[in-house]
Amino acid sequence: MIVAGLVLAVASAIAIGGGYALQHSSASRLPALTVRRPVRSLVLLFRSGRWAAGFFAGIGGWVLYVGALALAPLSLVQAASAGGVGVLALGGRLRIAERVGVGAALGGLALLGLSIPPHPPTGHGVAVAVVAWVGGSLALAGAIARARPTAAGLGTAAGVLYAAGDVATKAAVAGGARLAFVPVLLACHGLAFVSMQLAFQRGSKLASAGLAVLWTNALPIAAGTVLFAEALPGGVRGGLRVAAFALVLVGAVALSRRGEEEQGDPRLAPVSLTD
């Protein structure tokens, strides 16, 4: 069952990464989107066939992801999903900072995969702890979006929110009373969607979606240890885990620096995800 879960996770990463690339290529050319006029912004997006194709590819990828979570531990699924950063790097000429960022991110996520035991145990998580994680993620994402309304800042906020949604999804697939987490994961993904579309208009797909994919994969692996009893490995695997998160951080810094160098549309004002 774990192997089937990993196959679904890889397919999910390809679908979501490709969907982000299509959405970025369309949203970056549209008139300015704003959370103050949500209906107009959604109409602009869905009128683009390319954006709609990317959106539905992402929905399909998320369905595959839920299936993967039902078959395999959260940390293992996220490690297998790491290829999304590589998908976003295809089809374009990368600058030095982007090469460093993508290389470090992929290297770190690969080490995260190697640091996971072949058959890691997994639990359903204590509900209160899951709620606390999601609440903290919402607060952090909101603070980042307000302080840094750039491609990198909004992309990071989207990644934090998508990661929170993935944590809630893992809790929800246990069924029963845990289905109460379904509205929570939908809210997280909805706010992440808003943040991502705004990020697309402010910079490159790596500075926006690349950072989102990076944190969407890295944070749930940490949550697997903290919330779902997926034990931190010892020995060599433990060293790999530490090195992996160091590389993930290097990748995030490199992509963020590249994102900050980009000049955004002067019409795009600072945003609040709760406006």
Image: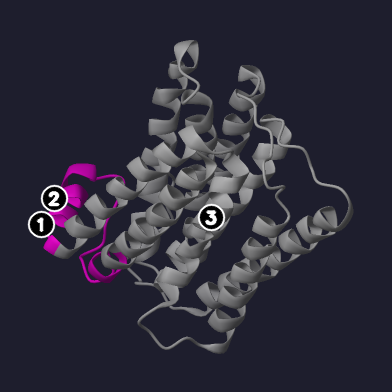
Question: Hey, which residue is sitting farthest top in the picture?
Answer: 177
Q: Are marks 1 and 2 in contact (CB under 8 Å)?
A: yes
Which SS class for mark 2?
A: helix
Give the left or right position of residue 21, taking residue 96 as reference: left
Mark nearer the N terminus (3 vs 1): 1
Dividing the picture into quarters, in which one does residue 17 lie?
bottom left
For the point 40% across and 61% down, the residue is: 199
Query: Quadrant location of the C terminus?
Result: top left
Residue under circle 2? Answer: 43
Q: Which residue is farthest right?
A: 235
Name the kind of residue labelled 2 in the image: Val
For mark 3, what is the residue?
80
Between circles 3 and 1, the one closer to the viewer is 3
Under mark 3, the amino acid is Ala
Residue 59, position as x, y percentages in the image: 29, 46
> Is 36 inside the magenta-drawn segment?
yes
* N-terminal-most mark, 2 or 3: 2
Q: Which residues are magenta?
A: 24-49
x 40%, y 38%: residue: 67
Above or below 164: residue 148: below
Q: Residue at x 60, y 24 (%)?
A: 124
Q: Where residue 162 appears, x then y in whole percent?
A: 47, 45
Residue highlighted by disc 1: 47
In three-dimensional space, the C-alpha distance between marks 3 and 1, rounded to whole angstroms, equals 33 Å
Rendered location of residue 152, percent (x, y): 51, 65
Residue 196 seen anywhere in this rendered image of the structure: yes
Amino acid tagged 1: Arg
